[in-house]
Amino acid sequence: MRRGLRAALAGGILAATLAGCTSFAPVYGDRTGGDMASARFNFAAPDSRVEQIILNRLKLSFPEPALPSDPTLDIAAAVSAPQNSMSDAYAVARPVNVRVEATVTIRRNNETVFEARRFADTAYQGGKLTPVDLASGEGASEVAARAAAEALRAAILAGYRP
């Protein structure tokens, strides 16, 4: 009987101690995030399909309707192919690297208030039929664009102060 009471008492003390030690902390510093929840941007028109993918993702992250006095968020993105493998052991299905490098610029009254540059890499197997290569390259570019958009979103949350 005493053993059961001690075990229950020790379990209660342990639970109370652990409950007192746990807490939630913001991911990006000591901010509560309330100011970013209401962040509004006027989004500049995209110049390419990759920029459109990035802007669409950022529009989902910052959905508040913007006023004309709110800052303008613009994306400049480029797709490149970093050096591929040097091996010629396989005649087909060689890996083709794809990189999307994007820069987000937030301007207010033609003055840059925030800028960040991020990139994302991916690859696909090339050297097959031309239509397959084209579709695979386009798909890889879109995947890298979505990853770059997430990196830019995190940069905005971490560094931009409205």
Image: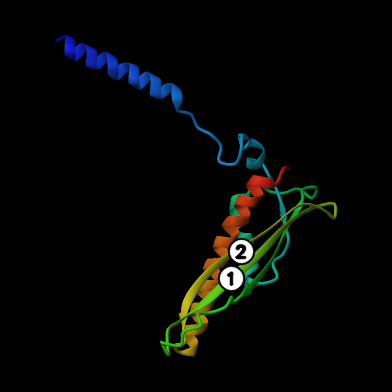
Mark sitting on residue 152? none
Taking depth in this image into account, of 114 and 50 the one nearest to the observer is 114
Question: What's the CA distance linking mark 1 and mark 2?
Answer: 7 Å
Q: Marks 1 and 2: CB-CB under 8 Å? A: yes
Q: Amino acid at mark 2?
A: Phe
Provide the residue designation for mark 1.
Answer: 99
Taking depth in this image into account, of 133 and 109 the one nearest to the observer is 133
Q: Is residue 114 above or below residue 84?
A: above
Question: How crowded is the residue under tag 2: few (<14 C-alpha within 10 Å), some, or many (20+)?
Answer: some
Q: Earlier in the sequence, mark 1 or mark 2?
A: 1
Among all residues in the image, which is located at the extreme top? 2
For image coordinates 77% across by 50% down, the residue present is 71
Question: How crowded is the residue under tag 1: few (<14 C-alpha within 10 Å), some, or many (20+)?
Answer: many
Q: Quadrant of residue 80?
A: bottom right
Q: Quadrant of the C terminus?
A: top right
Percent of width and height locating residue 127? 47, 87
Q: Secondary structure at mark 1?
A: strand
For image coordinates 57% across by 78% down, the residue present is 83
Q: Secondary structure at mark 2?
A: strand
Q: Quadrant of residue 78?
A: bottom right
Q: Amino acid at mark 1?
A: Arg
Taking depth in this image into account, of 35 and 91 the one nearest to the observer is 91
For image coordinates 52% across by 83% down, the residue present is 134
For image coordinates 65% across by 42% down, the residue present is 36
Percent of width and height locating residue 96? 51, 79
Percent of width and height locating residue 30? 61, 34
138 displayed left or right of 105? left
Q: Is residue 28 above or below residue 48?
A: above
Provide the residue designation for mark 2.
Answer: 119
What count of labels does the image hold?
Answer: 2
Percent of width and height locating residue 86? 51, 83
